[in-house]
Image (tube, rainbow, N blue to C red):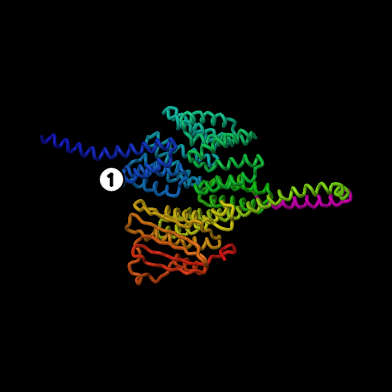
Amino acid sequence: MKKAVLFLFFGFISQFIFGSNQDLALQLEKAKKLKIAFKLEEAKQLLLEGLESAKLEGNEAMKAKFQLALADQLLSMNQVDSIDFYYENAVKIFETIGEKGNLIRAKTGLLELQRRTNPGSTMDQYLLLLKEARALGDREVYYFVMDKLITLNYAMENYEDAIAMNRECIQYYESTRDSLALAIKIKGLGNLYFSNGGDSAMFYFKKSLQYFERLNSYSNMVFTHQSIGWLLYLKGENDLAWKNLVKADSMDNLYQIRSAQLPFVMSLVLFKKGKVQEAIAMARKSYDMALKAKQLFICIQCADALTGYYKSLNIIDSALHYNELSKLINDSIRSQRDYRNAAKMQAKMEYDREVFQKELIQKEEIRREKLIRNFSLGGFVLVVIFLVAGWFAFKNNQKKSVLISRQNDEKTILLQEIHHRVKNNLSVVSGILDLQQRGIKDHLIQSVFTDAKLRINSMVLVHQNLYEQEDFTKIDTQNYFQNLANTIYKAYKKNDLEIEIEVNCKDVSITIDTLIPLALISNELLTNSFKYAFLGKSTGKILIHLKEQDNGYCFTYSDTGIGISNEDKLPTKVGLGSRLVEGLCKQLKGVFIRENQGEGLKYTFTFEGLGKNEKA
């Protein structure tokens, strides 16, 4: 009887421990299948839920596995802002519990953002991880690291080494009968021959595409059609190239794959077809996506392409701007330690400012020569003008409407370009701050960097909204404040805190002169709420309300946080945020009132507004 009781007791304990592990492992496997099926958001949500379950159960091993899988998932979705956090936590746990294979995978993932921005500095670290994987005797981990080395050699233009490694990987995946991995490496071999100028690229692209279509691997189908389109473009077969790129774009939109380079390749074909304005829009889109994903080499490709596009329109100022932007990104990469091939990449990717200036001088000289020739033929031209004066008068009326329409389009493009340029410059500054922040361990200094980036981002959103709309005089505040609040929420989001954000600014539009100060004020209030207002709480609510009044506007901000228990005990020292709010209120000629509601704070700000287009 005692033996039966003990047997049942230990059976129950085993089921409790190992059954939990088994459930979490099944959840991991399900997320992996969703990723392969390219249901990326579902896979991400499942991994987040699994991570929470592992935390609640105190299961450190499964917690680390979910963090590793989640970081890999976010990386595949180009949502790179928090991947270092998950990789670093996974590394610490795997080191503690001694899971060497997963430890190598996590360390490899931790190098990814550094590889994207500064490839040469990671070479020694990747080789060391490859050596560790070989010593471990785990072939799967070994070829996982080798795959990253292939990508690194590709970025550094070490094509022969990359091709040799790729062929070795193909042999391995043929032996394991892993069709998807095999197809990916065949596609990779095509990329290497494509970049190295070989004639075999198209063969490998088409061969891998057959695999991907059979496996329904839509993401890889997008990238393969993109590569085929690019190769056909280089061969001068623009119609076939466009057909493949449109197919890639439709799948990209349908499955939300977000290939940052696809719009860039499409812009090349559009430019070749003479559709310069559409090419500019596509290249800008690609630049924004690549900058967000920290794919700086694609940013350089786009900046160089935009330089050429604006040069063809003789908009030299914009061409020089993107030329300088290309140089700035190249310089930020080259300044990183141990970057070996930056000089070669720089020479390949950038235009020279002096070339533009010389071309302008040459064009001016040609124009003067034409004027001299025209004057010498003046007598003959006058006779011709009298004969055809009636005909020109008729045609002139037709051309006037076309000219006016063209001038309006050009003004719109130039205004969009100004706002896009300001947004790009601010984004580059934010990106440099982000790179600098990654090397800082002090949490207080990191917080200062985060606050600075959010202040810059509040201005970035203003210019982004302006260049995406046709009316440049006023901005849709509902959309703006919703995006601003969501951005700051993501920056300070905690796993155990859920905040409801309600924005009520419909049918209220204000000028950029008013919105930028108001945006900075809102940024400070939102930052304070997320940092301090909800300490010890699991839920909360933030309300942002803007309405028009007879003499201006009324802006109301409130939260349901812990409030201030005793206002007499407020610190006398005023921080940068408080000084900013005070100064910006004066700038807008407004009155700022704070009310302690017991549960939370309420801020009411009445102001007149700035700018010639504002309310009278």
Rendered residue at 59%/46% (across/down): 281
User: Is residue 368 a member of the stretch shown in magenta?
Assistant: yes
Residue at image mark 1 = 57
Q: Which residues are magenta?
A: 352-380
Q: Quadrant of residue 177?
A: top left
Residue density around tag 1, few if under 14, some if 14–19, many if 20 or more, within 10 Å: some
Q: Position of residue 34 (x, y in %)?
A: 41, 37
Q: Secondary structure at mark 1?
A: helix
Q: Is residue 542 above or below residue 14?
A: below
Give left or right: position of 56 versus 179: left
Q: Is residue 194 magenta?
A: no
Pick whichever, 521 or 407, lies toward us: 407
Residue 594 seen in render: yes
The front one of 411 and 99 is: 411
Q: Is residue 422 above or below residue 592?
A: above
Residue 209: x and y in percent read: 52, 30
| Residue in the picture at 37% in, 40% down | 102
Quadrant for the N terminus, please: top left
Kind of residue at badge 1: Glu
- Outermost residue to the left: 1
Pinpoint residue 272: horizontal percent, then vertical percent: 65, 40
- Specify whether 492 is left or right of 611: left
